[in-house]
Amino acid sequence: MNSITQRALKYSQLKLIIPSLIMLNYSSLGLTTETLNADPAATKLPTPTYNRVPMAAYNFMMDDPLLGNNYQKPLWNAHDTLGLPDWLAFGIEHRTRYESLANAFKGSQKGVQSQGGDQQIDLQTDFWLQAKFNKFRIAVELLDARTLGSDINNGKNPDTVNTTPFPANNASADTWDFAQGYVSWADQNILLSGLGTEVKLGRQTMDLGSRRLVARPIFRNTVNNFTGLRTRVMDYDKWQLNAFATVPVVRYPNYNSVTPNPNLLNNTKWDEEDFNTWFSGGIFEYSNLYKEINAEVALYHLSEADNPLNPTRNRNYFTPTLRFYQKPSKGKFDFQAEGFGQFGTVKYAATGINANTSQSHEAWSSHVEAGYSFDLPWSPRFYLEYDYASGSSNWKNHGATDTDGRFDPLYGASDFDFGPTGIYGAFQRSNINSPGYKIDFAPSKDLSFKFLQRLVWLANPNDCWGGNTCTSGTQPALANGNGSFIGDQLGFIGRYNLNSSLNFDAGWYHLFKGDFAKSAHTTTNTGTYLTGVNPTPGGDTNYFYLETQLRF
């Protein structure tokens, strides 16, 4: 064989070998020839599964730049009706909820800081607009939250015991403001690495991990939002990393010592970033760590300081978390185990005589649940659950040598664990010791129900029942009761989806009051409690709500 023939043979072999090596390298990244001819990350994207949209303004979640759309498109939708181009997304959602509360468990709350009267109508209207330009997106969400018909029947100021009205607070009302406004960049396969990457800058809402510490509340009428930078990197079916550095957005007008009695419904003021406070951290999620068991590890840091319109408790917390869980599946057991630590410094109150001394803060919390989904008609699932969140050794400990042990849930949601917020909001993840169970079942794909029962004790009987501050300066609370048993809570909720645009939801909760709820006294912002004022008028607490959501 002459040299020319040998060179020709080697060249023909290289033409076969080199493409094979290239494809071998691409295949190690999970890519194929079809992928290379189209979207390099297309084969890594999971097959879309369309879920029921939550009973809240959630249009912004309907088009995840890395995972695609996993919510069913509304039957009546403004985008198609208006004939808008594909690069422009537009949606409108409106929710109306009626709430009724009888025999409130905190009957002597400060009127200007109450959670509402014994009935209320919540209105939430949401507009979502997003423009896509290749890998860039510009998004704006405008949200209006307000309340109507709040009663004044139980409005007594615990400091003066004079009747005052029950205005809405900014957990229920935040009229016409920007919930989100950001620019983002996303690449589903950055540098052909097989990794999806998103960078988001601006005002935004966040749902991280189990949502127990960082969440956009679903039941609550207003949202938590933050302004800053968030970065997300994922290997689609293996792991995901979220990291962020933000400042919280304060909803104005607000109830505090600077503005003690604002009119939230008729006095519009733009929400503002609190640049004296920083909230940052990261969460790493790993799928199928062992078989079908998933894992999460996170660390959050809150560094809080006062500004002229927003006095704070100067919380400076580090909160590490660890969670293992297995998702529910028909005919299988599932579980969830999550632990939270918390340490740093805090002041007892934002204002008043107890606002000048910093205390050490050491607290912890946990959530454990185990369930089984039966492979039967109506898809029943039964699960046991247990929640614990530490309390302080004595709620009156205000000195520099005292340690604050009351766990702070930061910006988390509590409704899926402890029941509705709104004008009910009986429990949150703070000084609580509570086992319970839930039963889910769905007679059809459009009709679902949940029944639940939860027994609630105080984690520390020497602490108070209420918010993470347990003073009326922020959220009125009850203290100095008999024993530690708060009560037995029963709940029954149902949901009906007429179609992908119209949903109905209803719920009933009953709290059988325990010895502590019947005998405790209302705390004040001076760190004392009132005597001679019945904190729990009437009998056991009954709460009912009915809501409808229109989405188009």
Image (tube, grey):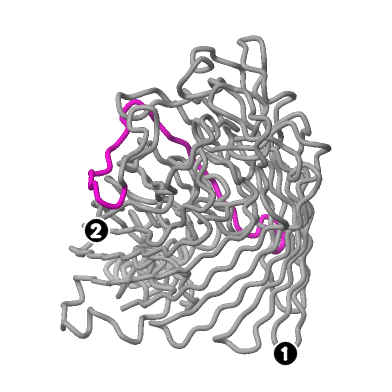
Tell me where the magenta segment starts and ends, as one range: 264-293
| Residue 136 seen | no
Residue in the image at 65% along x and 83% along y: 442
Q: Quick one: 230 or 16, which is closer to the camera?
A: 230
Q: In which quarter of the image is the C terminus?
A: bottom left
Q: Quick one: 114 or 322, which is closer to the camera?
A: 114
Q: Does the magenta stretch include residue 287?
A: yes
Residue in the image at 47% along x and 37% along y: 281
Mark 2 residue type:
Ala
Instruction: Indicate which disc, 2 or 1, sits on the residue closer to the N terminus.
Output: 2
Residue 69: quarter of image: bottom left
Q: Residue 311 carries which label?
A: none
* 397 sits to left or right of 100: right
* 228 sits to left or right of 537: left
**Label 2 Cα neighbours within 10 Å, binned few <14 / some 14-19 / many ≥20:** many
Q: Which residue is the site of mark 1?
A: 377
SS state under label 2: strand
